[in-house]
Image (spheres, helix red, strand yellow):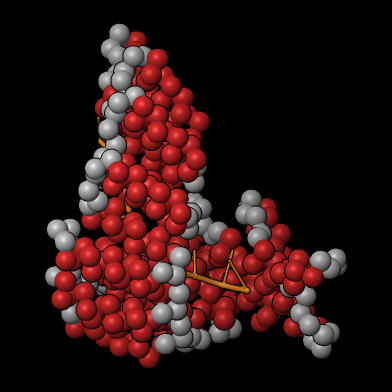
Amino acid sequence: MGNVEMALAVLAKMFLRGCSPNVHTFTSLMKGYFMGGRLCEALDLWNRMIQEGSEPNTVAYNTLIHGLCSYGKMVEAVSVSQKMERNGVFPNETTYSTLIDGFAKAGDLVGASEIWNKMITNGCLPNVVVYTCMVDVLCRNSMFNHALHLIENMANGNCPPNTITFNTFIKGLCCSGKTEWAMKVLNQMRQYGCAPNVTTYNEVLDGLFNAKRTREALQIVGEIEEMEIKSNLVTYNTILSGFCHAGMFKGALQIAGKLLVGGTKPDSITYNTVIYAYCKQGEVKTAIQLVDRLTKKGEGYPDVFTYTSLLWGVCNWIGVDDAVVYLDKMINEGICPNRATWNALVRGLFSKLGHLGPIHTVDNILANGEVT
DNA sequence: ATAGGGTTAG
């Protein structure tokens, strides 16, 4: 029984004993439904709360708005916030930051700005979370100078930026390949009283590896050790995949060894990246053995990522016939191949046949409207 | 009882 089911059972017992849940109970339960991916149940619960005569307060509304935003339902979220005001329940900083974050995740600067303006009109002062969400949406729209100005305004005003504000800015810069600027921010954030933490370094590392700046990435790896910043699983996974991205598969496997020695518990991303590294350097048998060993332990593994690497490896180093066996195995286990899986197979197939002109990957076929 | 930051195939 999952947590949500357990909570529901408790709720049912409450009703049976004639106890009516209060707004707090409904709000927590609704949050649970939203987090469990059960939008309909969450909304049903909201309606039931109204029927029970519980008056939703600001926190209850914020929870509903956050749930709607997390499903990308921005029109509905805004409409709830308007209804909230009409019902005389005052929106607070959390209401506005939730809505601005929702628009930011959708890349909608106009939507986010409208909420900002509304907030100012209503006499609500932005806090550090609201500002940080605005930095996020500005970055997603490549308005890095605006984002920087906003951070400077914060520092000059009475709402100083914190480490998360800078991490958001650095992430935005890295996502646009502006790694030099990101490095500059990394070095300057201390002047604002914000110490970089492990997330800051993880973001910079990812940015550098993606930009093929392997040398600088390695410098950062050294800096993390010097600074006595404790690497976490994400750090290791980022370095691991970064090494693979740079074609340094041996180095990647060494990092994996270091992770295990350090006592960090690997996750499916770690395993998939290691399997990818093995397959890329032709140690497909080792990769298969590792997958077999991991399969016994938990559920949900291997997954589509594992099989895509494995199929690529078998196709390129063993043979297409064997790859088809693994494709069957995958489908029998109920794992659905995706576009990348088919691409790995099609690429492998054509590289074996050779000199047949351009490679017809699934992407090419879809782009050109060709039919096989 | 509510809000902002991190990693994997192509």
Q: Is residue A17 above or below residue A308?
A: above
In the shown orientation, is residue A260 left or right of residue A163? right
Q: Most extreme residue toward the front, as rendered?
A: A121
Q: Nearer the viewer, residue A318 or A353?
A: A353
**Residue A2 is at least partly visible in this image:** no
- x and y percentages locating residue A230 in the rendered image: 22, 71
In the shown orientation, is residue A15 left or right of residue A372? left
In the shown orientation, is residue A193 left or right of residue B1? left
**The C terminus of chain A is located in which quarter?**
bottom right
**Image quadrant of residue A233?**
bottom left
- Which residue: 42% across, 87% down? A213
Q: Nearer the viewer, residue A20 or A69?
A: A69
Q: Nearer the viewer, residue A230 or A32?
A: A32
- x and y percentages locating residue A19 in the rendered image: 28, 12
- Which residue: 72% across, 77% down? A347
Q: Is residue A274 above or below residue A269?
A: below
- x and y percentages locating residue A146 in the rendered image: 35, 68
**The N terminus of chain A is located in which quarter?**
top left
**Image quadrant of residue A303?**
bottom right
- Which residue: 51% across, 78% down? A277
